[in-house]
Image: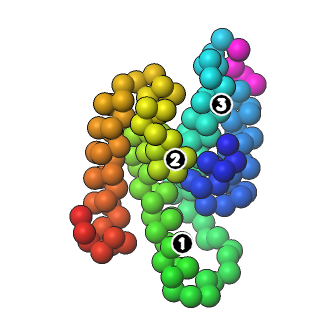
Amino acid sequence: MFRTAYRLTGNAADAEDVLQTVFLRLLRRTQADVMDNEESYLRRAAINASLDVIRARQSNPTLELVDVPSNRCDAEATDLRQALARAISTLPQRSAEIFTLRFIEGLSNPEIARMLGISQVLVAVTVFRTRQQLRKELGKFLGDRS
C-alpha cells in the first residue's frame, strides 16, 4: 500500500498519510464490508486515498521544500511525474483506479477484472480511453505526439 501511495503522491509524507487514512477507514468498516480479497481492498483503498490527497493538494497549492535537481533530466522527470499525478486525479474514480492498477501496480487486465469484479473487455476499453485522455493532457511532455 505504501508503494502504491508513494508512486501516486510522489512523497513519503503523503504516502504515510494515505496509509493512516486507509487503516482508519478499515477500522470503521465491519468485516462484511471488506471484500473477500483483503489485498485487493487495501490496494484499491490506497489508490483512492492517494487520489484524494492529490486533489486536496491541487485545491490548496503549497510550495514544497525540495532540493533543486542537479540536471535538467531530473527536473523534467519530476515535472512529468507531477503532471501525470495531476492528470490522473482529474480522471473519473474508476478510470483512475484501473489505470493505476495497470500501469503503476503492473497488474494485467484479467487480474484487474477479477479484482474489481468487471469484464476484461471493460478493463481494456477503460485503459485505452484513459491512455488517450492522458496523452492529450500530457502532450507537451510527450512532444505533442498525440
What residue is shown with label 3? Answer: 39
Q: Is residue 102 magenta?
A: no
Mark 3 or mark 2, which has the lower sequence index? 3
Q: Is residue 25 above or below residue 9?
A: above
**Picture residue at 24% right of the left edge, 64% below the top:** 146
The circle on residue 106 is 2
Question: Real-space Cα distance between discs 1 and 2?
Answer: 21 Å
Residue count near mark 2 (Cα–Cα under 10 Å), binned few <14, some 14–19, many ≥20: few
Crowd around label 1: few <14 · some 14–19 · many ≥20 (10 Å):
some
Would residue 56 be visible to someone looking at this image? no
Camera-side mark, 1 or 3: 3
Is disc 3 in contact with disc 2, using a CB cutoff of under 8 Å? no
Give me the C-alpha separation between circle 3 and circle 2.
Answer: 15 Å
The residue lying furthest to the bottom in this view is 71
- The correct choice, above or below, for 93 with respect to 79 in the image is above
Q: Amino acid at mark 3?
A: Glu
Residue at 75%, 25% in the rendered image:
27
Q: Nearer the viewer, residue 2 or 88?
A: 2
Residue 127 in the figure: left or right of residue 86: left
Asked whether 30 falls inside the magenta stretch, the response is yes
Q: Are marks 1 and 3 in contact (CB under 8 Å)?
A: no
Residue numbers of the magenta segment? 27-31
Label 1 to label 3, Cα distance in Å?
29 Å
